[in-house]
Image (tube, rainbow, N blue to C red):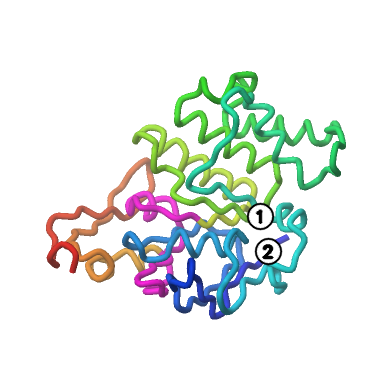
Amino acid sequence: MNHTIEARAVKLGYGGKVVVPKIDLRVDKPEVISIIGPNGSGKSTLLKALSRLLAPVGGSVLLDGKDIHRLPPREVAKVMAILPQTVQAPGDMTVCDLVAHGRMPYKRMFEQLADADRDCIGAALEATGMQGLQHRRLDSLSGGERQRAWLAMALAQQPRLLLLDEPTTYLDIHHQLEFMKLVRKFHQDMQLTVIMVLHDLNHAARFSQRIIAVKDGLVFADGSVREIFTAENLRALYGVETTVMTIEQGGSSHLVCFPHDCCLPCGA
């Protein structure tokens, strides 16, 4: 079943300061979507609103046509999983215990895990390559392993929508690519809708079908990668001159950008 998430005239802010004056967007089919834009443009703020972590000042966020803030949290969690930019758990918690938290939307308070829950946990561990590490403490894992553990917890929710806020920020290039390939695989195999905020433009171009470019709290451009990922758009967004070209890799092609000069003074 496909689920729809929609922002209608959404206005967002913190402590009286408006960060996003008005945004409209709609996601109604399984695809991988990257939200890009300069620092302070409102990317993460928008993702928080879509994921029910931030209530709009104006407008509304709708999940399957219903105001997401009026829906029971457990019902939202059965459809949507969120991996925020900063996540924390006790360091002595094991990977398996963390992933088990993904089953909480399906359990009553103090209810024990059933065989079906354990099957979901096992499937999530296997899908993320964490089966062999399931009894390890979180504080003994590398950054890439920890990120995969959190991803496994999100998968254990059996979501149809997966929202990720800068998921590769603290990872080296090897673990960034590993993580992005996992996300793409889950989209393909499970028909997940993935919405993620990314700073790495080449990851956005390589692993997405749709790009939403945000600038000054507004949607600057929204469309396919080939429509949005152009030197002209990147110049307007970031004030940087780039060369955008297509490269062939492993029998497929994707766009990459090579920044080479600032076209605007710093801070302009």
Q: Residue at x 58, y 37 (%)?
A: 150
**Residue topped by disc 2:** 3
Label 2 with label 1: CB-CB less than 8 Å: yes
Coordinates of residue 147 in the picture (x, y in percent):
51, 35
In the foreground, 61 or 114: 61
Location of residue 196 with respect to 223 vertically, above or below: above
Q: Residue at x 71, y 53 (%)?
A: 77
- Point out the stretch of residues depicted in magenta: 196-224
Helix, strand or loop for disc 1: strand
Name the amino acid, label 1.
Answer: Met
Residue extending farthest to the front is: 15
In the foreground, 190 or 21: 21
Disc 2 crowd, CA 10 A, few/some/many (<14, 14-19, 20+): some
Q: Name the quadrant of the C terminus.
A: bottom left
Name the amino acid, label 2.
Answer: His
Q: Residue at x 39, y 38 (%)?
A: 170
Q: Quadrant of residue 189?
A: top right
Q: Magenta includes 6?
A: no
Task: Indicate which disc residue 80 carries.
Answer: 1
